[in-house]
Image: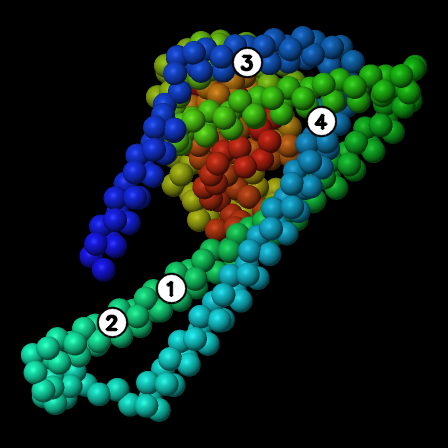
Amino acid sequence: MKKKIISLFLALTVIVGSSQVVGAAPTKSDLDAANAQISSIESKQKSLQKEIDALDSELVQLLVDIDVIQDEITEKKAELQKAQADLKAAQEKEQQQYEDMKTRIKYMYENGNTSIMTALLESDSIVDVINKVSYFNDIYDYDRQLLTEYQSTKAEVETLVNQVQEDQAELEENQASLKEQQSSLKSTLSSKQSQMDNYDSQLAEAKQLAAEYKETIEAQNAVYAQQVSNSSSSGTSAGASSIGSSSSSSKGSSSSNSSSSNKGSSSGTTSGSKSGQAVANYASQFVGNPYKWGGTSLTNGADCSGFVMSVYAHFGVSLPHSSGGMRSVGHSVSVSNMQPGDIICYSGHVAIYVGNNTVVHASNSAPYPKGGIKYTSPANYKSIITVRRVF
């Protein structure tokens, strides 16, 4: 048995060692290639932004948001279906293991289980003693293994239950956000129709620009996802990589609104790092507090933008109580160059980056930890539209 354990340990050591080689830290050429991708994406976004502003940034922003949310709903439905299937399989396994344990206990009760002391006293020789001790040890190990497997499966079921509930809550949140965005689009189109001389052609152009801009958002998120994957496999902190550091933090907006309010902002990223960390630390104090639609209280309830607004108000910065309005505060930074304290803008949602590929935010009205003020990782759990740095 010991030989088998040692062999298994050595095999696992080889596998782990191999995986560490495969998951080696990204090379300089990898980082340069990623930086080149980022620069190219930002350049295209900057060019598109000029066309969007010249046409109608509000209209294009709504079209982008709706398209992004629809994709997220499709993905979340698939994730929910998989989680539900995994949960069903795990629950069936748990029930089978439970039945097996009951059968084992019933057998032991009906057939009796001579104590080890009795067995030793009734033994005829030292060989018989050793055999019986070995037999009892095997029974003990088997029963312990059954219990350990059952406990492991039960924990897996509990995790999957939470995953299904979280996926369901997020799907409902995305659907509610989509409904709201579609209502806003309908209202916007009604007002624009009377203002635009060539309404149909401008609407078609807006849709085309929105589709192109969405492509750049997807490209940015893909680069960031790859960065996170590389950081995880090499054992470094996600989001702490130098990818994106060579590109200017104030150029190449990933926002659908290029104007800057510059409220409380500074141009340097060094001071931003220190002040931003203070913002992240302060925001983290309120994890566990409730969510409240339209709320701004960090203790009694806030919605996503109300939470971010109130956190920054503590540092003397005035921000709009609107997730869309926050896309134009401070200045834009690359998704791959996020620092603690940066505001991450999703479609219909905002959060504060706290580092290590994690955000703190006020999320939906479901009971905490599914809802309320909480941490979520990865930071790109939804498509990131833009990242804004105020300090």
Disc 2 marks a residue whose amino acid type is Asp
Res. 279 visible in picture: no
Please name whichever residue, 321 or 351, is drawn nearer the observer in this view of the structure: 351
Q: Nearest to the eye among marks 2 and 3: give it.
A: 2
Residue 256 lies, in percent from the top left, at: 66, 20
Sequence-wise first label, 1 or 2: 2
Looking at the picture, does residue 270 appear above or below residue 3? above
Q: Nearer the viewer, mark 1 or mark 2?
A: 2
With respect to residue 136, does 45 lie above or below?
above
State the residue at coordinates (25%, 54%).
4
Q: Which residue is mark 3?
A: 37
Circle 1 residue: 149
Q: Are marks 1 and 3 in contact (CB under 8 Å)?
A: no
Residue at coordinates 60% horizontally, 18% vertically from top-left? 254
SS for callout 1: helix
Report whether residue 332 is seen.
yes
First along the sequence among labels 4 and 1: 4
Q: From the viewer's perspective, is the residue at label 1 or at label 3 nearer?
A: 1
Q: x%, y% of residue 130?
A: 12, 75
Q: Residue at x 24, y 54 (%)?
A: 5
Local secondary structure at mark 4 = helix
Sequence order check: which comes first, mark 3 or mark 4? 3
Residue 64 - label = 4
The residue singled out by tag 2 in the image is 138
The local crowd at label 4, few if under 14, some if 14 to 19, many if 20 or more residues have their Cα within 10 Å, is many
